[in-house]
Image (tube, rainbow, N blue to C red):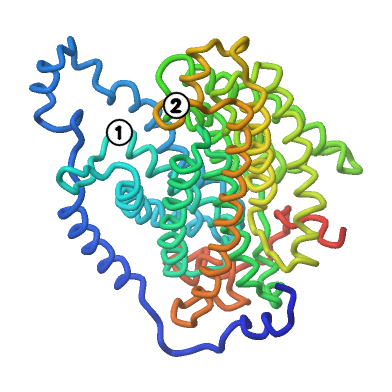
Amino acid sequence: FGNPIFRQCCDRPKNTNVRISLPAVCFVWQIAMIILFGIFIRYDQESDAHWIEYRKSQNISSDIENDFYFRYPSFQDVHVMIFVGFGFLMTFLKRYSFSAVGFNFLIAAFGLQWALLMQGWFQSLDPMDGKIKISMESLINADFCVASCLIAYGAVLGKLSPVQLMVMTLFGITLYAVEEFIILNLIHARDAGGSMVIHTFGAYYGLSISWMLYRPNLDQSKRLNGSVYHSDVFAMIGTLFLWMFWPSFNSAITDHGDGQHRAAINTYLALASTVLTTVAISSLSQKTGKLDMVHIQNSTLAGGVAVGTAAEFMLMPYGSLIIGFCCGIISTLGYIYITPFMEKYLKIQDTCGIHNLHAMPGVIGGIVGAITAAAASERVYGKEGLINTFDFTGEWKDMVPSRQGGHQAAGLCVALCFGVGGGIIVGCILRIPVWGDAPDDNCFDDELYWELPEEEESIPPILEDNNHMRNRDV
């Protein structure tokens, strides 16, 4: 893709007076959702009013056995991560907090409706009546789907219009539903916490879009591409919510019982290990020995990403600590060296540094999952435990752990291909000059899209604290 002819074909087109407005997109989309939900979406057996009859016919003793009571606590935690965790994590920019939280809110609410349809068509379509039967697990999976698009949002934060973000989310969720079906159903890879399906796909999808939409004159907005004291404090709110609820994220849709229990423990330990390692590397990387808030906001979460695929496996507690330790080092060094290198030489402007928080840890998670699956044995899992953990039933009843490891690796390759390939295609679509993207000198600024309080309308000189593009010349 370094070919100059390819680059010339993909140069940013000239401005045009034709613009697609945000209100039009929102109204048309919501009407379309109402129609499609009316045609396709129905309650599943456990959320339908006929549940009481079903319960009696199946000799179910109590309503407490309804899946709602098992899944809803995890759903609450994941939902908070999507709307509060991701939203506030992106408020580090000094003049983009309204957009960070507000557009996160918009594309999450927009995306989860399309996710219910797309995932339903692929995974929960009832062949008897052609309807999609949704449940509490469907809502969790829709939030997971949206999470991949919010990860991609981090790469283009401050540079795209809300209409472009909605287009990016529309295609991102469509691609996600397809790659998820291929990885989990056709390849039969296990990915409880979504290291491959969510993080690897979402990160490389966003990075590829950012590469396609490279802005050589983005330095015109350099004064706004940084943080101030209070914006970094708000971003830490997002970090802490994500950090606390990540065990729920990785265990939300695993099997009830030991798998879910193990996933929460493994994630908990990996996250704890990552924090200490990140603090150590951050301090060592500075000549003064002080900590960099960028590292603390982001790299402390990398262990939760990397342990996702193998979260429900017999990783062992010390294995979780090792994963967290390695990711703390790799992610922090990524912010110091790799992010500036990517912008300077690869022309990828990664605003939030999602390559360090999601892409590299996601790939590590996929590799760890493949190795752990291939090394599984009856001695460690037990015969029934091995069958239950890796779902060796039905057409997969003859699967052996060594072969399962190969399938896990294949799943990682599919996630990478969909992320990079899909991002390049969608990046080309987003270059069409009808989406109303911000000019180079107005990026990272709320004033372009929001009514601001009067005292905020003029931009006084603000001492730049830090940003996610430190060490540009390394």
> Residue 80's spot in the image, x, y percent?
43, 37
Side (left or right) of 313 relative to 134: right
- Quadrant in the rendering for residue 428: bottom right
Question: Can residue 190 be seen at all in this image of the molecule?
Answer: yes
Label 1 SS: helix
Query: Nearest the camera: 297 or 65?
Result: 65
Q: Is residue 317 above or below residue 426?
A: above
Residue at mark 1? 136
Residue corresponding to mark 2 = 254
Name which residue lies at 75% across and 49% down. 335
Mark 1 crowdedness (10 Å alpha carbons): few <14, some 14-19, many ≥20: many
Q: Closer to the camera, 262 or 298? A: 262
Q: Counting residues from the N terminus, which is met first, the one under dot 1 or under dot 2? A: 1
Q: Position of residue 217 (x, y in %)?
A: 70, 77
Q: Residue 383 at x, y = what percent?
A: 52, 12
Residue 171 is left or right of residue 152, and the answer is left
Instruction: Check the image and name the residue furthest to the front.
Output: 398
Name the quarter where the C terminus is drawn: bottom right
Task: Tell me the distance, in whole angstroms, between the alpha carbons under discs 1 and 2.
Answer: 13 Å
Q: Is residue 163 above or below residue 59?
A: below
Q: Nearer the viewer, residue 275 or 290?
A: 275
Closer mark to the observer between disc 1 and disc 2 = 2
Residue 328 percent location from the top left of the image:
74, 35
Q: Is residue 29 above or below residue 396?
A: below
Which amino acid, mark 2? Thr
